[in-house]
Image (cartoon, rainbow, N blue to C red):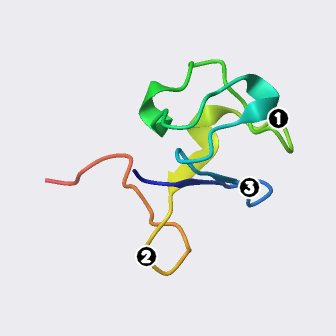
Amino acid sequence: MEKYICNTCGYVYDPAIGDSKSNIEPGIPYGALPDDWVCPQCATKKTDFEPETEDGGTMEIPLAVES
């Protein structure tokens, strides 16, 4: 399962670990987290996380596709 990184503080949400502070059990993918879930370190909204790349960084996701 894919890990996600907080754009504010760098916290990594790892589905294999979950988030014990928010009672999120291991095995819950990022997309299945509640919409009101926030970063356990800095309270950043779920929408401000990006998928982790293979090198440990984040990849930019385009907001709109130009045609």
Q: Secondary structure at mark 1?
A: loop
Q: Residue at point 49% right, 81% down?
A: 55
Q: Which residue is mark 1?
A: 43
Choose top left, top right, bottom left or bottom right for residue 22: top right
Q: Which residue is mark 2?
A: 54
The span from disc 2 to disc 1 (Cα, nearest Å) is: 25 Å
Residue that lies at the very extreme toward the bottom in this rendered image:
55
Q: Which residue is mark 3?
A: 11
Q: Is residue 33 above or below residue 39?
A: above
Q: Amino acid at mark 3?
A: Tyr
Residue that lies at the very extreme toward the right in this rendered image:
42
Q: What's the mark number on residue 27?
A: none
Q: In the drawing, does residue 42 fall left or right of residue 13? A: right
The span from disc 1 to disc 3 (Cα, nearest Å) is: 11 Å
Instruction: Determine contact: label 1, label 3, CB under 8 Å.
Output: no
Q: Amino acid at mark 2?
A: Glu
Q: Earlier in the sequence, mark 3 or mark 2?
A: 3
Q: Nearer the viewer, mark 1 or mark 3?
A: 3
Choose top left, top right, bottom left or bottom right for residue 47: top right
